Amino acid sequence: MNKLEATISLFIITFFCSIQYAFLAGVPDSVSQFAYLTVTNVIGFVIMLFFFFGELSRIDKNQVLQSFILSIELVAFNVFLVLGSSRVGATVCSCLLSAYFVFVPVLALILFREKPDWRAFPGIIVVLLGLFLMMDADFSGLLNMGTLYLLLADVAFALYILTMGRYSSSSNPSIIAMGQLFFSMLISLGCWIVQVAFFGKTFELPSVPSFWICVLYISFFIRGVYGIVQLYAMRYVSALETSLIFSTEIIMTMLMSPILAHVFNTQSEPITSLHLAAGIIMIAGVLMADSSVQASFGKLIKKIKESLSFLGQLSFSGVKASCIKWIYVTLVVAAIYAVIDIFVQLAGFLQYDSIIGLKNFLPSFAGALWGVYGAVATSIGSLAVSIILGVSVKVAVAECICNFIMGTGMWLAWHLFNASIDHNITFKTPRSYIVYTFSLGILSLVCAFIAACILNEQMFWPVFCAYFFLGLLLGLLLCIFFGSIICVETVIPVWCLVMPDMACIISGITEHDSPEADLSLTYCNNQIEETARYAGLPPKKIFEVQGCVEELFLRVKKARPDAVLYLTVRYGNSVSLRFAFKEKYFNPFLVQKDDDMLDAAGLKLLRHKAIRASCRYRRSDKMTHIHIVI
């Protein structure tokens, strides 16, 4: 991930946060707020545990403490938000919460002795002016206790942003996100028990669908996706710039109000010319405060071109993988598609045929990553749901055709138009976003035309909006997350295959320990240094890569003396190292009983230098596969 990807990701999760108010309206007033927080934290923690269970082996005391501190700040924010939102109007509440970025430079100076960037203050003043206009230039409703509580909530969230910015650069984001959800769950559960014991609340939860729709949305998008993406993105975007991006939430809420009102059959808030002017002013203020926009246009273009270096070719081709693996991927995607579709249809909060729903982001996302396999998976999922729920044949046929065309079309468009030089799903350049957006728009029009021909003309625009906007907002975010952070193996066409930057075999430490001179760790380190310098890596980064390779090799050879390691390397902003050896399964990231102090220090190096580290045993080739991203 680079700064451009991080900024786009932050805007997307801000959008998810802006539409949560439409779902929060479904929470009954009789439900305890701490009960709601407990349930959403529990489900969010389970979802994150499902995706990042393998990361638990990398946990340590510092990350547990960091997670606990972040959870206290989040709970404090939620408590003050609950106390303040009940005492002021919705517009005043939203505007006050959007102003928390004002406290970021002040708290940074007081608590962390960070000198503020005075060039950002004109942008802050402009954003505050936009907030003033957004409230219709009326502050008369602010003089009450609700305002004080919301200001305290702003302070708590500003402190959370600063703390997260300091932790995100040195800790594992997935562990931090899981940890803060775990501790938030315990704290909110304790507060709920106190409410039941002393304030007359109960442990009963409502059974109305609107409550559980809200719970699942908040759990997945806010507790899960929001937290993970924010932690990863803040490695590349400063705390102040992140806060200013989050402050645009009120603009998105205002613009989405008519659409959400139409979807949920509620009354929308009127959008006046003053509100539009306020939104434009706030966007201008965000751009003014952004350090990259303060320079001249020519220097900015040069800076972007320099920063958009390769992230690395972080995935292998699915063509060379076994059929069993891709069948497994197909079944998993089909199951996810079916679960999402069944839930949305049974909930009944969308007034459209089954071809439209939250699942419409999956064809573009799964197709871009896994090509025909992803397209077939979404078609299988839609067919399964049609059989289970008894959907009409016309609707089922239209949905299967649209999903297949969208998935295969996104895959072919990405590789035919060469959206990325290495043909992997990484959004390193503006060209990648342009290819993705235009391809998605054209394919959405094609799907809408097919649906209108098979069903009726009235389905054209709903189908287009469902595929395009969900694919753009959620599909793009997931492509960035899975392509640049998780580094999943993607399907690349045979004519687009690119060899790794470096490949070698290691069987001994020096040439005396190896059958051949070019099979030694010394020779491998020399090759890494030579190829890394050619790729433009700084000496410090080269040393980190060589250190991780050496430490992992030594740990494997200590446990499996006869192991021969196969190493492939891809360079970029991140360096992808993939190891494989054909011996009994061994996980080098776990502490062993015979580890000494030196081994423990080496293991700590592996854990903390890597953005991602995974180890799995593939039965098809009886080999252990290790992946490290530095």
Image (cartoon, helix red, strand yellow):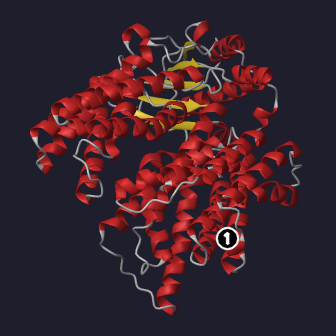
Name the residue at 53% across, 85% down: 194
Name the residue at 61% across, 16% down: 513
330 vs 33: above or below: above
Name the residue at 59% across, 50% down: 251
Q: Is residue 100 left or right of residue 343?
A: right
Mark 1 Cα shell of 10 Å, populated few (<14), some (14-19), many (≥20): many
Q: Position of residue 529 (x, y in %)?
A: 71, 15
Quadrant of the image for the N terminus? top right
Q: Is residue 248 left or right of residue 128?
A: left
Q: Nearer the viewer, residue 407 or 112?
A: 407
Name the residue at 25% across, 45% down: 338
Asked whether residue 329 is in view, the answer is yes
Q: Nearer the viewer, residue 611 or 17?
A: 17
437 vs 99: above or below: above
Asked whether residue 312 is in view, the answer is no
User: Residue lying furthest front in this view?
Assistant: 273
- Which residue has dot 1 on it? 150
Q: Nearer the viewer, residue 83 or 34?
A: 83
Q: Nearer the viewer, residue 41 or 249?
A: 249
Quadrant of the image for the C terminus? top right
Q: Quadrant of residue 460?
A: top left
Q: Position of residue 519 (x, y in %)?
A: 57, 12
Q: Position of residue 327 (x, y in %)?
A: 26, 30
- Give the SS element for disc 1: helix
Q: Position of residue 584 (x, y in %)?
A: 41, 32
Total marks placed: 1
Amino acid type shown at disc 1: Leu
